[in-house]
Amino acid sequence: MAHQWRGVVAEYADRLPAHLLERTVTLGEGGTPLVPAPVLSERTGADVYLKVEGMNPTGSFKDRGMTAAMSAAAGRGAKVVVCASTGNTSASAAAYATRAGMICAVLVPDGKIAMGKLSQAIAHGARLLQVDGNFDDCLVAARKLAESYPVELVNSVNPDRIEGQKTGAFEIVDALGDAPDIHVLPVGNAGNITAYWKGFREYAGLCPDAPGGSLPAVATRTPAMWGFQAAGAAPIVLGHPVTEPETVATAIRIGNPASWRQAEEARDDSGGVIESVTDDQILAAHRVLSAEAGVFVEPGSAAGVAGLLSRAERGLVPAGARVTVTVTGHGLKDPQWALRTLDGADVEPTRVSADVVSIADALDLS
Ligand SMILES: *Cc1c(COP(=O)(O)O)cnc(C)c1O
């Protein structure tokens, strides 16, 4: 146990607000692997690594922000928390609230939540309310509830969420010895791109007023931030909210991102881009990740890789650049996409009789 990872609040205590340390609520989140992806390096001519956030306790990066938000709420003596969610926030909030002995209310949009995530929220005992509306409606309602009742909001508009999530950037720099040239990630409500940009800047010593801002810089530079939205839910790319967002990538099916302005700042200040990728590109990247790189993610998580591959095809990835990609959530959350070919046909197992020769034949071994 001497070297057990303690969760991101304890591991990065000197760079987080002190109020998170009063009553830390943790399930050991963070410390996720940064996996080299030779398959993607070959396809892009860059040096590509995957930050595999599906390895967090509830299977997505949301746990980094949730340990912080829930620690802050616990420190203030909160009894009830609320969140709006496309799925992963509710899974995470439910688990951390249980850990903290709090009640967790979850507002999910009608009919668009991946089954794995819904079952997590229920398994952890959340008070789940399916709202007649989309994610953006749920977030408005959750904010109003928290304003009018003794309830803490744990969505990423809660600044403690961003504080926790910035540790993803810290871990990447710790693993590589410096910041990458380019950091890639999917963009939904835009909390994560905001958090990573904050983390990279703080680690490069560019935020003297941040907690730990007087500590020596760990990185010598910051990366260009490349964010990708789904084409049917791409408000930042289009420059206006999308009233009926639609995409297979339910985790980023958001028409009016709460951290819109911060995402544009991250893009502009880092010399990066925010572009959109189609559902076909997302599902193709999902397949490359699982069938070629050995990393199973949910569709939303594949949007970053889809964008990277798309830019590589257009000759827009600098040769030899060091590129890190946050793959945000685990494939088991929304596994149906693996059971379908890219043309939409169901995948059926090949039936064989129980003798070795038929099995060897079926495997083309003879
Ligand atoms: C929440 C989430 C996103 C989007 O992150 P934002 O911070 O909302 O931009 C992407 N992928 C997964 C798996 C998520 O859970």
Image (cartoon, rainbow, N blue to C red):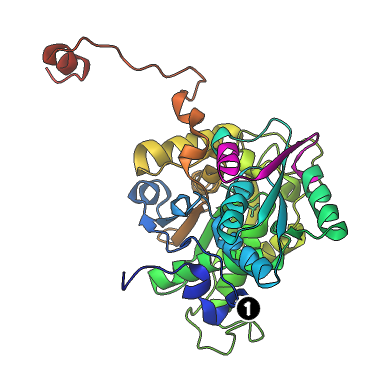
What is the number of callouts on the image? 1
Disc 1 marks a residue whose amino acid type is Pro
Residue denoted by label 1: 17
Q: Is residue 117 in view?
A: yes
- State the image coordinates of residue 177 (x, y, percent, origin top left): 39, 74
Q: Is residue 204 in view?
A: no
| Rendered residue at 68%/55% (across/down) | 190
Q: Is 109 one of the magenta-colored residues?
A: no
Report the front residue among 237 and 205.
Answer: 205
| Rendered residue at 49%/34% (across/down) | 284
**Badge 1: how crowded within 10 Å, few (<14), some, or many (20+)?**
some
Q: Is ligand 1 closer than 8 angstroms to the Cβ of mark 1?
A: no
SS of the residue under disc 1: loop
Q: The C terminus lies in which quarter of the figure?
A: top left
- State the image coordinates of residue 308 (x, y, percent, origin top left): 51, 49
342 w.r.t. 191: above or below: above
| Rendered residue at 59%/85% (across/down) | 213
Name the image quarter holding residue 6.
Answer: bottom left
Please give the range of residues in magenta. Answer: 117-136
| Rendered residue at 55%/41% (across/down) | 123
- State the image coordinates of residue 90 (x, y, percent, origin top left): 63, 47
Q: Is 135 one of the magenta-colored residues?
A: yes
